[in-house]
Image (cartoon, helix red, strand yellow):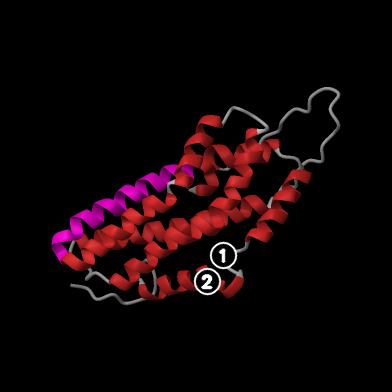
Amino acid sequence: MLDRWLGAGATDQADGAAPRKAPAERIPAIEAIQDEHRALAAILNGLSHIVQEIEEGRLEPDYTLLASMIEYIAEMPDKLHHPKEDRIFALLRGKTQEVDAHLDKLEAEHLDTTHATARLDRALVSYVQGGAANFPGFRDAVRAYIADEWVHLGTEERYILPAARRLFSAEEWEAINADFIRNGDPWSGPGNRYADLFRKITSLAPAPVGVGGAPAR
């Protein structure tokens, strides 16, 4: 679904302006953001599925798994993913005003990431401590967070990445790609922390989310 939201367009060169080198068809920075979106989407879909299964009585809660999923949601975007996007947001503001309203909202959401994921964490702690009686609060917190995150990701894929692809020159993309390398790769960076966490989630989660065997009721 994310792929359908991507678009590429041409921006006319202003008369008299120095010609800019067109960006390559493949832009590593965009691919990096999309790869991270897909990884996050996999965790969000998995968390949604597991919460639904618990609610319908088909799974016992695996608190270690739930905590690992929330840890991934909380840490990977804020520490590695959002800095990449913020670099693009800043450059895009100097190119056009057509997406300013989207950028305003996205930037505010990036700033609120810590608070949003802290609400999830508190809801899980309450669920662990209170058991089934506190599951509805956890379920509602998860669903609210995921609903907001789908809108956030959709806005970036529908509006921001296509605008950046259309408006940035090859030289600008080269500079962004270099920034992204310095920022780090969540899959091959120091200690492979987020790749390891992703694998841990996959090993713990029951099918069809992962390959684990969480006990059924």
Amino acid type, residue under disc 2 in the picture: Arg
Q: Position of residue 183 (x, y in %)?
A: 63, 59
Residue at 67% from the left image edge and 35% from the top image edge: 9
Comes first in the chain, label 1 or label 2: 1
The relative height of residue 138 versus residue 217 in the rendered view (above or below) is: above
Residue at 26% from the left image edge and 64% from the top image edge: 125
Residue 132 belongs to the span the image colors magenta: yes
Residue at 56% from the left image edge and 58% from the top image edge: 80
Q: Is residue 206 visible?
A: no
Local SS, label 2: helix
Residue topped by disc 1: 186
For the C terminus, give its image quadrant: bottom left
How far apart, in angstroms, are the residues tagged by discs 1 and 2?
A: 7 Å
- Is there a contact, CB below 8 Å, between mark 1 and mark 2? yes
Q: Nearer the viewer, residue 114 or 29?
A: 114
Q: Position of residue 18 (x, y in %)?
A: 86, 31
Residue topped by disc 2: 193
Is 175 on the left or on the right of 4, as rendered? right
Local SS, label 1: loop
Amino acid type, residue under disc 1 in the picture: Pro
Per the rendered image, the range of residues in magenta is: 131-154
Is 103 on the left or on the right of 55, as rendered? right
Secondary structure mostly taken by the magenta-highlighted segment of the chain:
helix
Q: Which mark is residue 128?
A: none
